[in-house]
Amino acid sequence: MFQWVRRKLKDEQLNEISRSQSPDNEKTEFNPPKSSEQSNRGSPAKGAVTESLRAKAAGRSETKEATELPTSAQSVQRTYAAGLRVVPLMQQLLARTVYVFSSENSYQNYKKNGRDAYRSLLLASTEGEILGHPLYKVAKGHTLSNMFKRNVPMLKIYKYVVVSSGSEPPTADAQLISLANDLALYEVPFCAIFCTRHFLSSIVEYTLTFQRDDGPAYVKMRSEWGHRSYDAMMDGLNVRWSHRSSFVSFGGRSNFKLVVLQEDMPNLFSEGGRGFFDSFKFERSLSALPVLAEYTTDNASILPRQMMRLAEVEIPDSSYLRPSDFNAVPWNIEVIICMSALIREVEDQRSRRSSGDDLHTTQSMGLGQSI
């Protein structure tokens, strides 16, 4: 999928160059940043993105479906509809921990088996896959014991790994969760998200630090104060989580779409700075760009219940056969899921601050007793 996106962006760039060389077109063109300079500003470290997706994309290019790829983002989603991965985010009532599931089927089985990890492993031992248990656990990094310490991650993401009971733990700091037959379920640290605020440039930078077998990998995201969009670099592509709000939605629900920016479109990692980014902010329409994933809260739970559905991530993924298999989640999709967990946390903090401002305004008007 990423190779097709690169070819599409290259064709569009060549068309724009041909139009700019015509005498009737006097529109100012922005030069893209050099790739060598981009690599020093927020690009993932070596090993951050595996080559598995490239190899699978090359294998699919020989098929008939791969040679007839559409040009619009909506057609892309229809093409990969058979492999659309829906990743639910769930939170228990009066709890701060968020759980992320590998598929909708796994989330529904989690509600049926009473949130029992032992029963989930029994299903894994009989069907060869894990059903009814989360794939990730998202916990807040700031606690009462480390609230005054520096370099504390704002979020800690743990991954659940299923191995044979006779084998060694996946990592030295892995925690055993459950045993069933010849399988063992471990909880291992997977990602830590750090936040840095640049007051002079009004930029908030998030660093996602992944623990991998070949060493740590880093993915950076940036956002601007007062704007609900997030720029990142993924697999050498400039991507953006674009916020799409709906005025008719209940409860202030909104969507974020992960779109691939063209090479000449500036972002928060561009060398021109904030002024260069602001001058080009509304020049292009993001609706025509390729969509890699979508974070939506349309199916979130409205009323409080024991298990509350917070959001879901829809990712076109045709590289897997069984969406509930823990070992079948590609690395690029894991990065997208962790970025979605970060967006959910930032949006939750934003909603709590806005609720506090509304309460303060109401009390200052003498209406506090009527709440």
Image: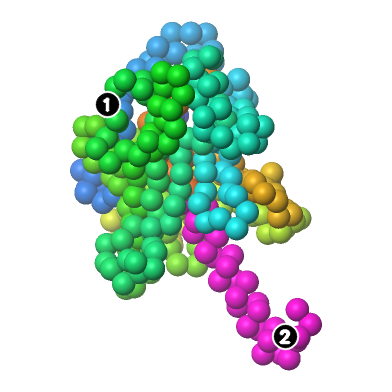
Q: Is residue 75 above or below residue 223?
A: above
Instruction: Give the CA separation, mark 2 to mark 1.
Output: 59 Å
Q: Check disc 1 and give the amino acid type.
A: Glu
Can you give x and y, in whole percent of width and height, for residue 136 in the image? 46, 40
Point 68% across, 59% down: residue: 252
Q: Residue at image x 31%, y 72%? A: 148
Q: Residue furthest right?
A: 370
Q: Nearer the viewer, residue 271 or 235?
A: 235
- Choose mark 2 or mark 1, whichever is in front: 1
The spot of residue 44 in percent (x, y) is 28, 42
Lower sequence index among marks 2 and 1: 1
Query: Closest to the observer: 7 or 31?
Result: 7
Q: Could you tell me which secondary element the residue under label 2 belongs to?
A: helix
The residue indicated by pointer 1 is: 168
In-image side of 162 versus 242 (left or right): left
Residue 272: assigned label: none
Q: Which mark is residue 368?
A: 2
Q: Amino acid at mark 2?
A: Gly
Q: Please identify the dominant SS of the magenta region.
A: helix
Q: Indicate the quadrant containing the C terminus: top left, top right, bottom left or bottom right.
A: bottom right
Tell me the element at label 1: loop
Q: Which residues are magenta?
A: 342-371
